[in-house]
Each structure stands twice: as structure tokens, then as C-alpha cells.
Image (cartoon, rainbow, N blue to C red):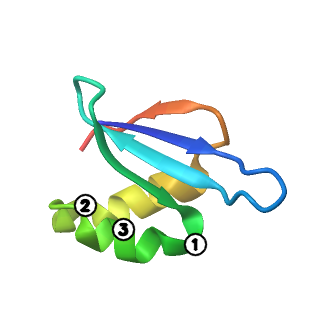
Amino acid sequence: MYLLKTQGIGNVPDFVQIRDKNFVLIEHFSLKTMKNALQKIALPFCSEILKNYIEKTEYGILQKIEY
């Protein structure tokens, strides 16, 4: 799984993309709605792991997530 955090400009919020191993988009959400978006993903067992990765990842860096 891959994670990409993008920084918004002006009124555009910061966003997160979560992609699978084939780089298919699983979820795209703003950081303001992160809690609800992570609960919506069919991976409830790793929502805390994803939250930690999101908080630690810098903007614009593609992060591979091993779980």
C-alpha cells in the first residue's frame, strides 16, 4: 500500500491519497476528515497504523506502507 500527502494552497485543504500495491486509488480525503475516512476504508485493523504514517509523512513524498 502507498500513501501520498499533498499540501493545499489557499482555500484548498491538504489531502491524502491511499493506493494499493498496483497503485489503484483506494481512498482520497482531506486531513480534516481523516478520522471518518479511515473508518470508511475496509481496513479497520490498520486505521491507527495509517494515522501514524499520515502524521509522520512529509508533503509530496510517496510513502510505501508495510503492514
* Residue denoted by label 2: 46
Spot occupied by residue 12 in the image (x, y as percentages of width and height): 72, 57
- The answer to whether 10 appears left or right of 53 in the picture is right
Q: Is residue 60 above or below residue 67?
A: above
What residue is shown at x 80% (from left), y 50% (from top)? Answer: 9
Going from the N terminus, do you reach mark 3 or mark 1 first?
A: 1
**Mark 3 nearby-residue class (10 Å; few <14, some 14–19, many ≥20):** some
* Residue denoted by label 1: 32
Q: Residue furthest bottom?
A: 36
Spot occupied by residue 2 in the image (x, y as percentages of width and height): 37, 35
Near-viewer residue (6 or 48): 6
**Which amino acid does the dot numbered 3 rest on?**
Ala
Q: Is residue 61 above or below residue 56?
A: above
Q: CA distance from mark 2 to mark 3?
A: 13 Å
Spot occupied by residue 54 in the image (x, y as percentages of width and height): 51, 54
* Residue denoted by label 3: 37
What residue is shown at x 46% (from left), y 69% (from top)? Answer: 34
- The answer to whether 36 appears left or right of 34 in the picture is left
- The image quarter containing residue 13 is bottom right
> Split into 4 quadrants, where in the image is the C terminus?
top left
The secondary structure type at the circle numbered 1 is helix
